[in-house]
Image: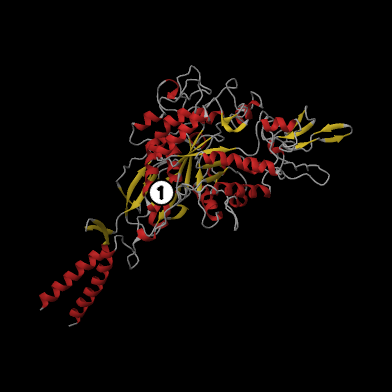
Amino acid sequence: MFSLVVVVCLQLLLQQFMESAVAQPFPNYHTDFVDIKQHKNVPKWWQTGAFYQIYPRSFKDSNGDGVGDLNGIADSLPYLKELGITATWLSPIFSSPMADFGYDIANFTEIAPIFGSMADFEHLMKVAKELDVKIILDFVPNHSSDECDWFKRSAAGEPDYKDFYVWHPGRMVNGTRHPPSNWVSVFRGSAWQWHEGRQEYYLHQFLKKQPDLNYRNPKVRETMKNVLRFWLAKGVAGFRIDAVPSVFEIAPDAAGQYRDEPRNDWVNDPDDYGYLQHIYTVDQPETLAMVYDWRAVLDEFTDGDERILLAETYSPIDIVMQYYGNATAEGAQLPFNFLLITEISNTSNANDYARTIQKWLQHMPQGRTANWVLGNHDQWRVASRLGADRVDMLNMLITTLPGASVTYQGEELGMTNVWISWKDTVDPSACNTNASVYEHFSRDPERTPFQWSSDANAGFSNASKTWLPIAEDYKQINEDEERQKPVSHLNIYKHMLTLKREVQTLQLGETEVKALNSAVLGVKRFLQHDFIYVTVLNIFDDIETINLKESFTDLTEQMKVVMVSTNSKLKVGDLINATALELLPKESLLLRTLPTFYTYYTNGEARQLPVLVIYLVLAQVLLYLSYHRAL
């Protein structure tokens, strides 16, 4: 009689469980079934986006002058689409004398002839729309070119432009005129330049040909908002804001004087930017309010997808987080996270990586989106900074961490810095020094032309001479060559972006980051009703054996290999033992748990049933047969 009661109870429980299971298409590992399709969050286009920076001079030359241009970018957009890029940010393409290669803007609403015309830009926008690759422009708010019409009018003292820039007559000391303060330019020397025509100094925190706009003047603020509106009306998806912390400097005191900044004792060169502590020229509170105002301008454009701001700031983490916004105002959707650049070096171990990643995640306000930047046109390339044998692991890292990833052109290929002679150096940061030290300041090595193929000039241009030299290794490292290899930096990057788009866990899952030992970093992504994904990176040159189940919960005994680095002996689809995983030097893997459910089909729909239920069914059958045999 007791056995009969057990069978009946099991039948009732199983019937209730099966009815619930059949009614829903997804499994739940916690006692009931929930239709995830009704409850899952759909991220906004930028929240899990793959952003790609194009440095236009170096991407693709369409007219044979040795300089990249807009038509070259338009022709190459299918490549970005194939990679899986969500949006591309273009470094400045506006009218400029090119003293700082476009960051000295003469007209904020005109295209520089070297890059093409407004018609070319509109063609680019059309192609981008057809391919669904969004275009983000560089917004350079801190300064203009000294050849800008605004500056010329300001220097002439025209009433509407007189205070468009930061002017000051200077200090008189013993009858001799001196600059208004001791402030130093990023590009060395005084940040004040005497203007003979106006008989005053103007402020330039960068080159002397880049005078600072005066954001304490409401006309300047409104003019720059109108610049944003101009390009938003043309359909751009948003802006990367250049040098945000420098937009405001401290206001002059009651006597109209600017305060000197205190010096750093560890720098002895008074012309070096590091000579001073920049407490009056960066990170002023008004700058945050200005960013919030710019965000409000973007929010005026409600047609289509949300427009976004990406903010360039190397400020302390507590200040960076304020760029997201506050309780009353929205700010930049993505203040750039440069921690993987500023805090990770060639000698950093797994603990360093874990702390760096957790630093951003722990400081980030609730409800905001993380982002991970590996490089840009101002930083050494990843392969040169952290090692060519770490390219895959770092690309795998930023594409499995939560939020958006930001890639500088060529990093998907593993391009390296190119040595540039003093004679060929064009970067003003280096040209303002001398032949013995210029290499410490030059940004030319990371700005060399993109390597498309093994053809002349790496397929970048058919010119006899390109604006910067081509890398010597271009015949080995180029897009065409890597495309042919199933396991290459390029294809690993492309497949990782595909996974990020298609796998809910990598988009919406929770994140656990830890050092499994001093050499191995682990990143676990997990989401209820889905597989668990684990990225493991062996950072150094020894073979490491690790037990993943000791570090992360809920893993299966065996795990499936989803992605491998180029130096791995494993293949996609292989199974590994999660309790004894051997990693080769600098090897990186993306792993996935094995199914704990059975997929079946009913009414043309795939449904999933936990394996435990199948075992219960079999147990019931056996019990039932045993009971009848006993009778």
Residue 175 in sight from this viewpoint? yes
Residue 588 image offset from top left, x and y in percent: 40, 43
Which residue corresponds to the image point at 20% horizontal and 80% vertical from the top-left?
A: 5
Look at the image and name its color scheme: secondary structure
Residue 32 image offset from top left, x and y in percent: 33, 67
**Quadrant location, the C terminus:** bottom left
Seen in the image, is 191 located left or right of residue 242? right
Residue 105 in sight from this viewpoint? no
> Height in image: 231 above or below 3?
above
| Mark 1 neighbour class, 10 Å CA radius: few under 14, some 14 to 19, many 20 or more | many
Seen in the image, is 307 located left or right of residue 546? right
> Height in image: 38 above or below 281?
below
Residue named by callout 1: 535
- Which of the two residues, 191 or 359, is positioned nearer the viewer here? 191
> Height in image: 168 above or below 561?
above
**Quadrant location, the N terminus:** bottom left
Q: Quadrant of residue 572?
A: top left
Q: Residue furthest right?
A: 174
Seen in the image, is 259 located left or right of residue 211? right
Q: Residue furthest bottom?
A: 1
- Which of the two residues, 578 or 344, is positioned nearer the viewer here? 344
- At label 1, which amino acid type do we have? Thr
Residue 275 image offset from top left, x and y in percent: 71, 38
